[in-house]
Image (cartoon, helix red, strand yellow):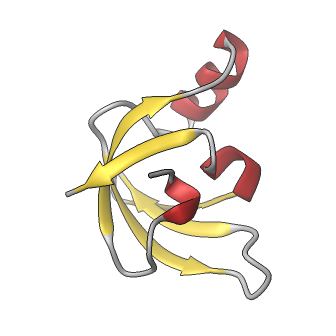
Amino acid sequence: MTLGDAAVGSTVIVAKIDGDSAYKRRIMDMGITKGSEIFIRKVAPLGDPVEITVRGYELSVRKNDAQCVLVKEA
């Protein structure tokens, strides 16, 4: 399952980040790293962006970015 597929109100754990090294670095710089816990707060009406809580702060992630983050249920 990807971050973009996770249901609103659920908590997930990052299993893997797909993409090239520069792309992975950008995602990890936002605090989304393997093993981090993410709470899905909201999804915009058209599905983009996804608002999440990670490491105690709120973050909006584009749907393209969310599809590259593989997660599992917490």
Number of numbered discs on residues: 0
Measuring from the top left, give residue 72's x and y in whole percent.
30, 50
Measuring from the top left, give residue 3's x and y in whole percent.
51, 55
Residue drawn 29% across the image and 66% down it: 11
Picture quadrant of residue 9: bottom left
Residue drawn 27% across the image and 36% down it: 35
Measuring from the top left, give residue 70's x and y in whole percent.
46, 41
Observer-nearest of 32 and 65: 65
Residue drawn 19% across the image and 57% down it: 74
Measuring from the top left, give residue 65's x and y in whole percent.
69, 45
Q: Is residue 5 rendered to the left or right of residue 48?
A: left
Q: Visible in this render: residue 28?
A: yes
Task: Pick out the residue farthest to the left.
Answer: 74
- The relative height of residue 62 versus residue 21 in the rendered view (above or below) is below
Task: Pick out the residue farthest to the right.
Answer: 46
- The relative height of residue 50 versus residue 21 in the rendered view (above or below) is below
Task: Pick out the residue farthest to the top.
Answer: 21
Q: Visible in this render: residue 62?
A: no
Task: Pick out the residue farthest to the bottom.
Answer: 45
Q: Is residue 38 rendered to the left or right of residue 47?
A: left
Picture quadrant of residue 59: bottom right
- The relative height of residue 55 versus residue 48 in the rendered view (above or below) is above
